[in-house]
Image (cartoon, rainbow, N blue to C red):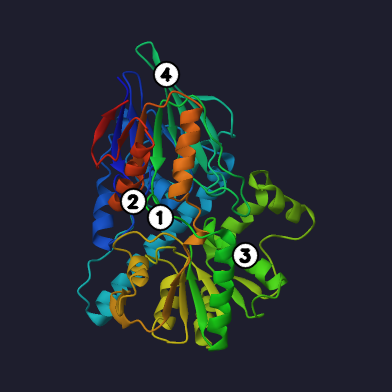
């Protein structure tokens, strides 16, 4: 029997964890943190309903925290087995997981200060893991290049293909032998979009029997890249003209680099004014350095730009900020500028300080460039609520909020359907299982897949077990 249990990212977009069981082995696909409402996410992350003694191997699709961030919890529970990922993903996990520890520690310290100083009715926060747990995870990671077959557990052989989502992201292909029968499972992780800047387009696995597909944007289409570029330029020009500041909450991995790359192009073409652009995220600075180490993952345009001696991630007026004093100095000035800061869903990190300083000003703009999960501050901003809670205190929102979905590194509905069609064309596809999506997106995508005559299409609930 070959079975998948859906622990996380089932009818939601965070906490990706899928447990593959056969009569011979147990393999965990991704081990991500739940992100969202503080008390709810802490409880979900602490529970981690996985018997680590049963797990033979972990396969990590990419380094985003909602896919990798619970690995140190697994280590803390006693897991000492291998964790397989691409070389770039392994390199990215070092700063990503270190930053997760730093954010948890800083948030705990800040909440404690608010409770003691202002006597706020807040629950104290205890970090989920320590730096020692992160060191243990990195020591267990085995880097496997794209296209190389690797036995990861008895009867389970893995091949990683380029997912085109973030640097090092992989489509995981597992050949699973059980009871004399071989089943090929294709797991998209997070599926990228064709023709995005910097990275190569997603690859299509062949001979897949079961497709485990993300569905984040299963109910909508992205704007064309050119339209998104002009949208970014227009936001910067309009905000600058009224003397305001643009705050861009951004995932430190990939989204920040894409926005920097686009701003560089707009500056070169003189489509935006020469105002300062601050990248205020120590993590983004570190991740951008990792990008420079992996040009093997770039598409042709980015690769040629790099080899011409022109860095894709530097331009005049761009300032990378790491130390706290320089970060605070940004908000001490009212001069027009662009501030790119993590975290992408506004649930932690320095972006919260910038939002607190700008959310009440009518001349300012909060520019949302990525998916915002339910119950996050980012989602509440997208909903343009008149008041938002930052660090436990309600703040009136007067700043303009603009959403540019075209920067998303996730495939939209058309991209997901095209990918599924390509997989079906290349093999005997029997099942499509949808994960990493909210119910409306999954229902819309399921309907489209059924209209096209796909075989069994399901969107499992948390805790469901499906026989392949």
Mark 4 or mark 2: name the one nearer the start of the chain.
4
Q: Secondary structure at mark 2?
A: helix
User: Badge 2 is on which residue?
Assistant: 441
Of tags 1 and 3, which is closer to the observer? 1
Real-space Cα separation, disc 1 to disc 4, in angstroms: 39 Å
Of tags 1 and 4, which is closer to the observer? 1
* Residue 435 image position (x, y, % from top left): 35, 43
Mark 1 or mark 4: name the one nearer the start of the chain.
4
For the residues labelled 4 and 3, say whether their Cβ atoms are less than 8 Å apart.
Answer: no
User: Badge 4 is on which residue?
Assistant: 155
Q: Residue at x 28, y 50 (%)?
A: 439
| Position of residue 313 in the picture relative to residue 89 (left or right) | right
User: Badge 1 is on which residue?
Assistant: 220
Real-space Cα separation, disc 3 to disc 2, in angstroms: 28 Å
Mark 4 or mark 3: name the one nearer the start of the chain.
4
Q: Residue at x 32, y 74 (%)?
A: 391
Q: Quadrant of residue 86?
A: top right
Mark 1 or mark 2: name the one nearer the start of the chain.
1
Nearer to the camera, 171 or 208? 208
* Residue 382 image position (x, y, % from top left): 37, 69
């Amino acid at each position: 029997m070959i079975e998948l249990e859906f622990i996380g990212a089932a009818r939601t977009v965070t906490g990706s964890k899928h447990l593959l069981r056969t009569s011979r082995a147990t393999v965990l696909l991704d081990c991500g943190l739940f992100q969202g409402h503080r008390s709810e996410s802490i409880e979900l992350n602490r529970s981690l309903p996985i018997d680590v003694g049963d797990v033979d191997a972990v396969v990590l699709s990419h380094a985003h925290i909602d896919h990798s961030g619970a690995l140190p919890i697994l280590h803390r529970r006693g897991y000492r087995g291998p964790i397989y990922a691409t070389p770039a993903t392994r390199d990215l996990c070092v700063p990503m997981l270190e930053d997760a520890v730093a954010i948890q520690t800083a948030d705990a310290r800040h909440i404690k200060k608010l409770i003691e100083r202002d006597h706020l009715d807040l629950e104290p926060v205890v970090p989920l893991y320590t730096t020692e747990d992160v060191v243990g995870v990195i020591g267990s990671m085995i880097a496997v290049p794209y296209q190389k077959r690797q036995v990861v557990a008895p009867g389970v052989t893995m091949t990683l293909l380029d997912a085109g989502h973030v640097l090092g992201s992989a489509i995981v292909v597992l050949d699973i032998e059980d009871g004399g029968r071989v089943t090929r499972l294709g797991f998209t992780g997070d599926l990228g979009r064709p023709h995005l800047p910097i990275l190569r387009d997603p690859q299509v696995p062949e001979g897949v029997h079961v497709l485990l597909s993300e569905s984040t944007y299963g109910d909508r289409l992205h704007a064309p890249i050119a339209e998104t570029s002009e949208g970014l330029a227009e936001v910067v020009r309009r905000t600058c003209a009224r003397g305001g500041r643009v705050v861009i909450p951004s995932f430190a991995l990939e989204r920040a680099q894409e926005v920097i790359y686009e701003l560089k192009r707009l500056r070169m073409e003189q489509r935006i004014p020469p105002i300062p652009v601050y990248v205020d995220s120590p993590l983004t600075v570190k991740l951008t350095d990792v990008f420079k180490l992996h040009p093997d993952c770039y598409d042709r345009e980015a690769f040629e730009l790099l080899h011409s001696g022109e860095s894709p991630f530097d331009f005049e007026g761009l300032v990378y900020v790491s130390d706290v004093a320089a970060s605070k100095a940004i908000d001490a000035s009212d001069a027009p500028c662009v501030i790119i800061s993590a975290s992408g869903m506004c649930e932690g990190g320095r972006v919260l300080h910038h939002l607190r300083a700008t959310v009440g000003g009518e001349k300012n703009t909060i520019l949302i460039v990525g998916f915002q999960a339910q119950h996050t501050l980012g989602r509440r901003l997208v909903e343009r609520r008149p008041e938002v809670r930052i660090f436990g205190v309600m703040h009136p929102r007067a700043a303009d909020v603009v959403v540019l979905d075209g920067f998303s590194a996730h495939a939209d509905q058309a991209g997901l359907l095209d990918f599924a069609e390509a997989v079906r064309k290349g093999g005997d596809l029997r099942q499509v299982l949808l994960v990493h999506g909210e119910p409306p997106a999954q229902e819309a995508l399921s309907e489209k897949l059924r209209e096209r005559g796909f075989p069994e299409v399901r969107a499992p609930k948390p805790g469901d077990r499906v026989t392949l």
